[in-house]
Amino acid sequence: MKESIQILQACEDVQESRLVFGTWGNVSMILEDGNIIITPSGIPYDELREEDLVVCDRDGKVICGKQQPSSELKMHVAIYNTRQDVKAVVHTHSLYASIASSAFREVPLLTEDAAMVLGGKIEITNYKSPGTQGLADETVRCLRDVNAAIIANHGQVGVGPTLEDAIFAAVMCEKSCELYTKALSVSKNPRFLEDEEISDLRKIYVEHYRKLRDFKE
């Protein structure tokens, strides 16, 4: 299955980007038949094999796989069932996003690249217990139509129409959290991009850079 290979490659990519540690975090994508393929619970990324991946339907019922699906399956299901534009989800416990998840109420965007990829400031959920429907609902609420959200006292989630886009969103979320944390250490009022500026930058990215990337592929 080509999608399983993409998932395994994505797991390598998020490790190389230092977005995950050990078994913390999960990756999923939508299959051609509309079902969800997701990483299992409790297996380190560098030990994952194709046969460890789990296929579930859009209600979260396991269709195929010997392992237990990720404990955050409800969150993945809720995102896919709410955001028709999203075909891949990457959830990580990266360092600066985890700091932001307890230190801030939201993370404004300071740079153009983050604005282009994410499309809006990063909101932080109210705290909900991991693996619950409450956490799933809060994550969907804070994602809105943006491509990343921070989960309070937990981590972050990046989404996109492809696994590449979802990983890129997670990377930009982590970068934005790091920049904002460090900017506050040197300025009480760092300059951040306004909503209109972010919207304009996102439009440029979607209509030019992303189309150019897709054409090259």
Image: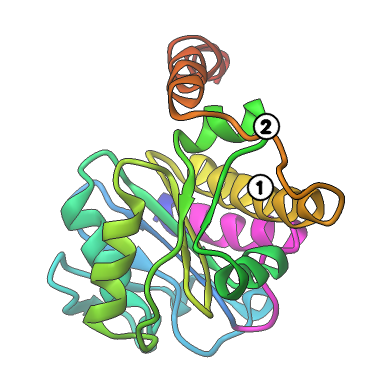
Number of marks in picture: 2
**In the rendered image, which quarter is residue 65 located in?**
bottom left
Residue at x 56%, y 86% (from the top left corner): 43
Q: In the displayed image of the protein, which residue is found farthest to the left?
A: 59
Mark 2 highlights which residue?
Answer: 111
* Magenta stretch: includes residue 13: yes
Residue 70 spot, x, y in % from top left: 40, 80
Q: Which residue is drawn at 24% across and 55% down?
A: 80
Query: CB under 8 Å between callouts 1 and 2?
Result: yes
Circle 2 SS class: loop
Q: Which of marks 1 and 2 is nearer the N terminus?
A: 2
Find the distance from the CA under tag 1 to the CA under tag 2. Answer: 8 Å
Mark 1 is surrounded, within 10 Å at the Cα level, by few (under 14), some (14 to 19) or many (20 or more) other residues, namely many
Which quadrant of the structure image shows residue 28? bottom left
Can residue 34 be seen at all in this image of the molecule? no
Left or right: residue 115 compared with residue 180: left
- Work out which quarter of the rendered image holds the N terminus and state it: bottom left
Does residue 4 sit above or below 118 in this rendering?
A: below
Q: In which quarter of the image is the C terminus?
A: top right
What residue occupies the far right of the structure in this picture? 186
Amino acid bearing label 1: Ser
Magenta part of the protein: which range? Answer: 5-23
- The mark found on residue 176 in the picture is 1
